[in-house]
Amino acid sequence: MLLFVFLCSSSVIAFIVRRDWQNLNERHQAQTELNTQLASDYFKKELEEGQYVTDSIESGTVGNGGDSTNFAETAKYMLKKYPDIYSLQLIHGSQTINVYHKKATEVGQSSLLHDSESRKIFEYCRKERINGIVGPIKTGKDKNSLVVLKPIFIKGKFWGYSVTAIKRKDLFKPTFKKLDKLGYDYRLSKTHIITGSYHTLSSTLKKDNAQAKVTFRLGGCSWKLEAARKDAGQMPQEVKSGIFSGIFTVIINTVLVALLLNYLERGRRLSRLVDTDYLTGLMSRQAFDRDVSKYLEKHKGEPSVGALIDIDDFKYINDLYGHDAGDATLKTFAKVLEDNFGQQGLVCRNGGDEFAVFLKRTTMIEGRAIFKKLFRQKLTFSYQGKDYPYTFSLGFAAYPDQGSSREKLLNKADAALYAVKMTGKGTMAAYHPDMVKEGRSQLGFNLRDLAVNLPGAFFIYRADDGKILFANMELLRIMECSSMEVFIEFVGRKVKGLIAPEDYAEAVESCDQQVGDSDDAVAHLNYHVITKENHKRIYVHAVAHMVKNPYFGEIYYVILGPRPEQK
């Protein structure tokens, strides 16, 4: 009997230990993959910042027609904003302007092009007209850097290079330190931009011992981050303790209960992670779909309402104020939705800036009234201590009349949301059968179609500084400009450069008088424009609509039409 109990107990312990170890390894594997992905995303983001700076310098140089007078001032601003950057260079011919972090500008021969290997890569990027990331190479006083370069072409002709040198050690050190603190060995590698062969930038990982691997493409290179737990392959101490404690029958029961409770709790935590959106704390789309489907299955035919909501012009918030402001907006809006609908239904983040709401035991009329209350609330996001308003759009549909399942219900709500987007945003709409055809047909036309094909000439400019933000192809044709770049160079990007000098002061005065202090006004103006190639004076009538944009301030939308000269 004792032998039987011992063998049975040993078998039970062996089974439990093996299963728990396997589950632990699976969770470690999942965590390793997650942390590797996060670290890779950070590297990519930092490298993309270097690429963004390089692109900005290139755009500024092209915009100035190759004039590098303001390069040093712009470079110092960029270096202050991005401390991981070691230096910025502008290479033209054999000469280079090099601006170091918190140091004076140096002008001289380009050391990067003196190196034959670097020169090959520069020439390759010029030939292929691509951004490239070179390195690590030595720059300045023995600085080990990654170099981001972009060839500059002005009017189709090669001019030189925009170069950003990033301090490799400063760039990678924080994340490597974090990985080491979390108990991971790692290896970061990149391919040569021409040969495609990998070489290691930094590594603590033993050969072929990676548990997770993430790759991405950037700067003409493939990047690879590999990681593995330092204790990979070793039996965890808790498993050893379980084996030793299993010798005693009394302790066996205690250990089994403890392992079971621990296992259940870890399962619940893992389930909560899967069912929760990491940023907003709302339900994930997976959990939302599951719970809505279960509810409809249990309450067949009972009235319910499904809605899709998204933040209007969310890309503006990210582009103008940064992703931190965008994330804060998503969190704040998620709390608003949870406070309004959490007690009556289910709320989830659908992805990006889109959210889904399901209201239980709610008719179409009741749902409309509930959603109207949401629109009465003033919504703002904060940036650098200042609050900015934003709006949202909402489309909804009713179960079971308009959708007999979760999929059909949310598809109808999606059609209603598209209809709102096509008719002005900032409001809501209930689903109607005509929405599918009409909404989708409108989506076939975008801003580019209108800019290219609209027969009238129009442009948009900012009131405070007169900067032209947009001009369509018809205006470029009238002004005898072959491209937007030529047009911008011709008028100096300002509306003052578009209007004939002798008409400008009168046009501004007339516009100010007609608009006054209004937040939404239209002005009618007459003035001349002078074309680029033949210097023709064209008399035009302009209709200028001034609106206040929450992101750009006061904006004028202007339509131009030729008219006969006054006699």
Image (cartoon, rainbow, N blue to C red):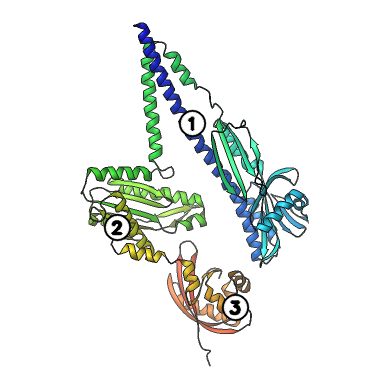
Q: Earlier in the sequence, mark 3 or mark 2?
A: 2
Q: Measuring from the top left, give residue 296's x and y in whole percent.
A: 25, 46
Give the residue at mark 3.
Answer: 480
Please state which of residues 28 and 392 is positioned toward the viewer in this rendering: 28
Please say if 341 is above or below 249. Answer: below
Give the residue at mark 2.
Answer: 372
Left or right of residue 254, residue 453 in this image: right
Give the residue at mark 1.
Answer: 28
Left or right of residue 65, residue 340 in this image: left
Res 81 visible: no
Q: Amino acid at mark 2?
A: Lys
Q: Measuring 63% from the left and 35% from the top, which residue is drawn there?
A: 203
Name the quadrant of the N terminus: top left
Secondary element under disc 2, as helix, strand or loop, is helix
Q: Measuring from the top left, give residue 514's x and y in whole percent.
A: 46, 78
Q: Amino acid at mark 1?
A: His
Q: Amino acid at mark 3?
A: Glu
Task: Look at discs 2 and 1 and give the one toward the viewer.
Answer: 1
Please state which of residues 398 and 330 is positioned toward the viewer in this rendering: 398
Q: Measuring from the top left, give residue 91's x and y in whole percent.
A: 73, 57
Within 10 Å of disc 2 (Cα), the crowding (few <14, some 14-19, many 20+) is: few
Marks 2 and 1 sit apart, C-alpha to C-alpha, by 47 Å
Within 10 Å of disc 1 (Cα), the crowding (few <14, some 14-19, many 20+) is: some
Mark 2 near mark 1, Cβ–Cβ under 8 Å?
A: no
Please state which of residues 390 and 446 is positioned toward the viewer in this rendering: 446
Q: Earlier in the sequence, mark 2 or mark 1?
A: 1
